Amino acid sequence: MNDSLFADDELPTAEPQGPQDVWHVLMVDDEPEVHHVTEMVLRNFRFDNRKLVLISAYSGAEGRQIMTERSDIALAILDVVMEHEHAGLELARHIRKDLHNHYTRIVLRTGQPGQAPEEEVIREYDINDYKDKTELTTTKLTTLLYSSLRSYRDICIIDAHRRGLEKVIRASTEIFEAGSMSHFATAVLAQITNLLRLDGAALYCASIPLDTEHRNRFRILAATGEAAEFMTEDVAELPREVKEAFDEALRDKTSVHKNGHYVGYFTTARGSQNLLYVAYQNPLTSLDKQLLDIYAANVAVTYETLLLKDEILETQKELVYILGEAVEKRSKETGAHVKRVANISKLLALKYGLPEAESELIKLASPLHDVGKIGIPDHILNKPGRHTDEEFAIMKTHAQLGFDILSRSDKKVLQLGAIIAHQHHERWEGGGYPQGLKGTDIHIAGRITALADVFDALGSKRCYKEAWPIEKIVEEIQKQKGKHFDPDLVELMLQNIQEITAIRDAYPD
């Protein structure tokens, strides 16, 4: 080995020792003395508060195995000529082309420059430096280490930011797709846990009213870990450390990073203030904090969108009830009938096995079942006695009228309302109106609403009859099983009669 390999040049001052994280450097050379001397020279080397661990390989094949098995090599110093004259070059190509490793810094070193001309090697191979062994004095070796590790560190930081932003995008997509406020809050906590690799930490997502009377009341939307005990609709008192963290963020109107917790502060376009509290055990990195801030901004946008969506849905639901109640009042019946039918319909839909979203849609649409009665003359609609055949023919037109009114809309609730209005007087065995459908040709929403409507109508006082007792209602429903009503739905109603009567009791006339 050349005596000038590590000349006694003055070493740069080593950086102070910090955490026990290390830099892994791979030395691939078929001369054992090179490994020994390199290890001695770099024994006290420190960079960025980390010491260095030298990993030795004595052939290109051995180096290939190590690089295949490990992904934490910061720098690989490769001899060119080992088991054959291009062993180091082939290893460099394998690292880049086969392993797709573009992070590890590669330095080729040769004692026989003529075997692989420098310009050709740098041009043809994706390496970071090419050194003649005679060039690498002690000082130049440590300088090489500093520059290579600094480059590797910066690449890793950039890559960590890239992967972090990808996580934020995926996490944001999850909350963007949330269909309700509860799903949104749950998604926020799940994605924050994923982003920060937290385990069992206490997490809050809270909405803060702006009115001074309730400025210290926090609506907890979701909580995990130790915070789960505070998961109620409205919480007046929170743990002192959480309350103080919230107060600091509200006072300064900014997100707060402190030892042990983070509070994300964000406002919406409508002026509401929102807080996201995260308690953690291990310190957050600067990248973690940046990701939290970016994510919190996306949370604010989604929160605002969901508030508007909830407001629209509530308005839509209220208008449907108002319209249904208006029809019932015109026929001198109570508006509570449509609420009972709506809730009974949802219960039956869920018991039938329909998804929550579809069951909720049936609940929203079923109050419109009799909307067509708005076109029926009062003297027929409110006649206390039996209708003549001519009057009954006019009364039956309300099913078609309801369909005609509602089917003009392209909104899901009104489209389903049109189907229900059209089909809730069809009969399972046929013979109903207006289409004479039978069996499963009748839409499930029409079958469900028909049963819920008749059940509640029999138990309600009308201008032409008194309310029936529950025993008589059950008897009549059983008689109509497989005739007027879907037999499976009748069975479900009878099996859950206590829940159904509880709904009736909850919305009295």
Image (cartoon, helix red, strand yellow):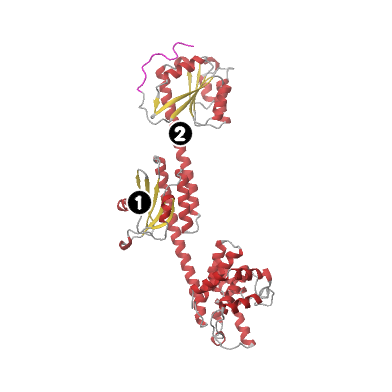
Q: CA distance from mark 2 to mark 1?
A: 37 Å
The segment highlighted magenta reads: 1-13
Q: Is residue 117 magenta?
A: no
Q: Residue 209 lies in what quarter of the image? A: bottom left
Q: Nearer the viewer, residue 431 or 462?
A: 462
Q: Tell whether 350 sits left or right of 286.
A: right
- Image disc number at residue 242: 1
Q: Is residue 11 left or right of residue 79?
A: left
Q: Name the amino acid, label 1.
A: Val
Tell me the SS state at disc 2: helix
Q: Position of residue 329 (x, y in %)?
A: 49, 80
Neighbour tally class for label 1: few under 14, some 14-19, many 20 plus, Cα within 10 Å: some
Residue type indicated by callout 2? Ile
- Image location of residue 473, percent across then percent down: 59, 78
User: What element does badge 1 sit on?
Assistant: helix
Q: Position of residue 250 (x, y in %)?
A: 32, 53
Q: Nearer the viewer, residue 198 or 357?
A: 198
Q: Position of residue 465 (x, y in %)?
A: 56, 85
Q: Dividing the picture into quarters, in which one does residue 390 lie?
A: bottom right
Q: Which callout, 2 or 1, points at the residue further toward the start of the chain?
A: 2
Q: Is residue 408 visible to the viewer in this orientation of the structure?
A: no
Tell me if 324 is positioned left or right of 223 in this view: right
Q: Residue at x 63, y 77 (%)?
A: 475
Number of numbered tags placed on the structure image: 2
Q: Nearer the viewer, mark 2 or mark 1?
A: 1
Dominant secondary structure of the residues highlighted in magenta in the image: loop
Numbered badge on residue 155: 2
Asked if 77 appears above or below 270 in the picture, the reply is above
Query: Is 173 placed above or below 397 here?
Result: above
Residue at the spot 51% in from the left edge and 24% down from the top edge: 122
